[in-house]
Image: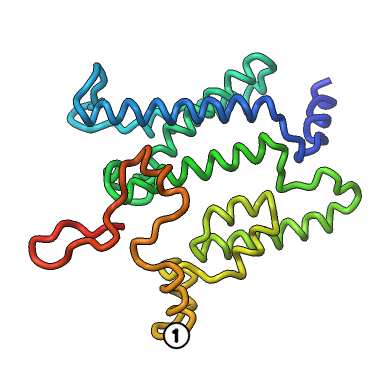
């Protein structure tokens, strides 16, 4: 009986999207993120009953709780594979853990407490990208072809090519289009063939100093240029740095 259940589990199609579970996860993720930002703002302002958690003089960031929560949810899912309603409970806990962890994404990169600094805006970017992925899954978009049938080889080749376009798009600094391109391949192709951001890994590697392509990239993406969703980032992370930060003796730190 166990062997039959195991075989049936492995034969299940991997491209089936469980939309109710995605909905539970996404809702928990968004609610937790908003509440976390409200609480951290209150702590920063010294208002309300909330305070930073310290142990032995060490500030415990909320991403620590998120990491342990994700580890626990993963272990429970792999070990027990619970049925409803516990499966939905795990989905909610996963969304909570993911929000707590991604809300301090900038700290992963910098290994420093940059939560309220210019670099901390990367955390909100990461949360927004994760939200877009969740919304696409909820709408039924999938990087896997549900109707591939016997053409699995062709579908796999298309998926690999799409992933290459996604990688190029991200290296060119077009992260959002690259991520959405996982689900809508034509967007990954468009992002991959367009001009790279001048400060992206692709431009630093392939656009020679003084080249016409680098000059075009700098005109297309001037210093201080704001993205379309920057006002939304401002709502959670605060207003970004000024486009032309001061320089010279006594000047403050440069903007990101």
Find residue 164 and report its horizontal and vertical position in percent: 64, 63
Q: Is residue 141 toward the left or the right of residue 32 in the image?
A: right
**In the rendered image of this protein, does residue 248 appear above or below residue 21?**
below
Q: Residue at point 43% right, 79% down? A: 215
Q: Does any portion of residue 50 appear in the rendered image? A: yes
Find residue 111 and report its horizontal and vertical position in percent: 31, 48
User: Considering the numbered disc 1 on the image, is that residue within a helix, a strand or a loop?
Assistant: loop
Q: Is residue 215 toward the left or the right of residue 244 in the image?
A: right
Q: Does any portion of residue 164 appear in the rendered image? A: no
Q: Residue at point 76% right, 40% down? A: 15
Q: Residues within 10 Å of mark 1 (few under 14, many from 20)?
A: few
Q: Residue at point 34% right, 45% down? A: 107
**In the rendered image of this protein, does residue 120 appear above or below residue 9?**
below
- Quadrant of the image occupied by residue 226: bottom left
- How many numbered circles does the render carry? 1
Residue beneath disc 1: 211
**In the rendered image of this protein, does residue 155 appear above or below residue 36?**
below
- Quadrant of the image occupied by residue 38: top left
Q: Residue at point 78% right, 30% down? A: 9
Q: How is the image coloured?
A: rainbow
Quarter of the image for the N terminus: give it. Answer: top right
Q: Nearer the viewer, residue 41 or 18?
A: 41
Quarter of the image for the C terminus: give it. Answer: bottom left
- Residue at the top extreme of this rendering: 85
Q: Is residue 6 toward the left or the right of residue 58 in the image?
A: right
Q: Nearer the viewer, residue 166 or 186?
A: 186
- Residue at the right extreme of this rendering: 150
Find residue 246 and report its horizontal and vertical position in percent: 18, 62
Find residue 244 and report its horizontal and vertical position in percent: 25, 63
């Amino acid at each position: 009986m166990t062997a039959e259940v195991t075989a049936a589990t492995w034969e299940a199609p991997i491209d089936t999207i469980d939309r109710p579970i995605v909905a539970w996860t996404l809702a928990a993720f968004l609610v937790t993120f908003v509440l976390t930002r409200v609480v951290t703002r209150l702590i920063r302002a010294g208002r309300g009953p909330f305070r930073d958690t310290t142990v032995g003089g060490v500030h415990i960031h909320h991403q620590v709780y998120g990491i342990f929560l994700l580890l626990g949810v993963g272990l429970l899912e792999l070990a027990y594979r619970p049925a409803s309603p516990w499966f939905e409970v795990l989905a909610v806990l996963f969304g909570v853990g993911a929000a707590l962890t991604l809300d301090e994404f900038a700290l992963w990169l910098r290994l420093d407490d940059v939560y309220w600094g210019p670099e901390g805006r990367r955390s909100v970017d990461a949360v927004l990208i994760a939200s877009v992925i969740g919304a696409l899954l909820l709408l039924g978009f999938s990087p896997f072809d549900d109707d591939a049938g016997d053409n699995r080889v062709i579908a796999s080749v298309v998926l690999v090519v799409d992933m290459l376009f996604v990688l190029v798009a991200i290296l060119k600094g077009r992260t959002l289009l690259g991520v959405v391109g996982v689900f809508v391949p034509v967007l990954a192709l468009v992002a991959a063939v367009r001009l790279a951001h001048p400060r992206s890994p692709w431009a630093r590697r392939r656009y020679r100093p003084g080249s016409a392509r680098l000059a075009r990239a700098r005109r297309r993406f001037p210093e201080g240029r704001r993205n379309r969703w920057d006002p939304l980032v401002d709502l959670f992370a605060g207003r970004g740095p000024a486009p032309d930060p001061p320089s010279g003796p006594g000047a403050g730190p440069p903007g990101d």
